[in-house]
Image: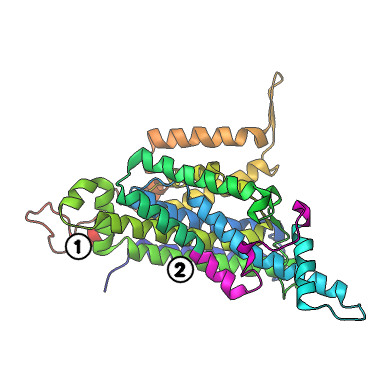
Amino acid sequence: MRALPSSVPWFLGILGLVVLAVTVMSEAVGTGLISTSFLKVLGMTLCFCLAALAMDVVWGYCGILSLGHMAFFGLGGYAIGMWLMYARTEIIVAANLAGRAIPPTEAELRDAIGSQIFGVVGASDFPWVWGFAHSLPLQLAMVVVVPGLIALVFGWLAFRSRVTGVYLSILTQAMTLALSLWFFQNDSGLRGNNGLSGLQNIPGFLDAPQAAVALAFFLASALALALGYVFFAWVVSGKMGSVIRAIRDDEARVRFLGYPVEGFKLFVFTLTAIVAGIAGALYYPQAGIINPGEMAPIASIYLAVWVAIGGRGRLYGAVIGAAFVSLVSTWFTGGGAPDIDLGFYRVDWVDWWLVLLGVSFVLVTIFAPKGLGGLVDLWTERRGRDRHGADLGPDQGALREREAGE
């Protein structure tokens, strides 16, 4: 049985303590030390951490700098958002038509729902992309199928052509730009730049307190992050992890040794796209709204910055980076950080936060390539890996079993 990295129990333990503390301090439990709005911020931060995990596996471990994974994040959000908007609108329309002397037919009800949803873009008919919006199980399947299928097709075309390096990054960015531009169009069937709104109103829980709903999504996001961490730790450990890292370090040599490089890259790219879609499906019901701007290329660049600041090639580094940047960003842009009046100029952090983030990225890249995750290495006094177990090579300096498993 494949051994998981030693960071897994530590991560699960710390995450469990954080979840317990937040739950006890939430308004849903009664203490109210953490407001419902901030609880939603924490839940969304956990979703960002899950997306960062996926980005770290595809970039930090496999060496594919994807600048399109936030597009998959957005696709997952749109998939669940379509059902949320349809189901909520159906409840409202059915209540409005209930007082009629003659009950509405199914066709009349559907037409009324369509007019309510698409009236903002001057339409009333349901586009083909909404074909499964009435069914929660089918839309949940779309959360996985749509990002996975797009990643599979794109990856197959790119990897079979052996596009690598910066050219592959540009292609992923072009894919993201094409998707966001299509979503911006009114005739895409997804309400153009209006996006989908009111997603925080969960059908079946409309009468439930927002504090309870926010806590439920926070717990679901924490569970998804825990499962994602364990799963990715399993993926990058053992022989599979060794092959993936070898592709990152010297793709030509791995291909020369007879490994199906394109198959491994396609597997990692598609798998991480699916996980990013799941993270998006959990994020947007907490955010309450999604629009095509969420899928713009800049969002995927931010994701890469989070991973770099946290320390790529370390699963816990990706989580630390995403959590740190997300929470600090909320503090700076939400009015927590006081503006600085220099007399001749006033520093408004809402405008200057992205500049600060960019400078931080440059400084970390130059002076601390291990990122914030490197602090964990210092704390545990593990500057280098312990080499124990049987030799996996002809000499005493060869890779050992324990290192291959981490």
Q: Which residue is mark 2?
A: 227
Residue at 72% from the left image edge and 76% from the top image edge: 204
142 part of magenta stretch: yes
Please, which residue is most extreme toward the bottom here? Answer: 102
Mark 2: few/some/many CA within 10 Å (<14, 14-19, 20+): some
Q: Is residue 186 visible?
A: yes
Where the C terminus falls, by quadrant? Answer: bottom left
User: Which residue is nearer to you in this view: 19 or 113?
Assistant: 113
* Mark in the foreground, 2 or 1: 2
Which element type, helix, strand or loop, lies under badge 1?
A: helix
Residue 210 place in picture, x, y as percent: 73, 66
The quarter of the displayed image where residue 258 is located: bottom left
Q: Is residue 103 left or right of residue 4?
A: right
Residue at 62% from the left image edge and 67% from the top image edge: 217
Q: Which residue is mark 1?
A: 401
Residue at 68% from the left image edge and 32% from the top image edge: 348
Residue at 61% from the left image edge and 62% from the top image edge: 129
Give the CA distance from mark 2 to mark 1: 25 Å
Please, which residue is most extreme toward the left here? Answer: 394
Residue 275 place in picture, x, y as percent: 47, 61
Instruction: Name the kind of residue labelled 1 in the image.
Output: Glu
Q: Which residues are magenta?
A: 119-145
Mark 1: few/some/many CA within 10 Å (<14, 14-19, 20+): some
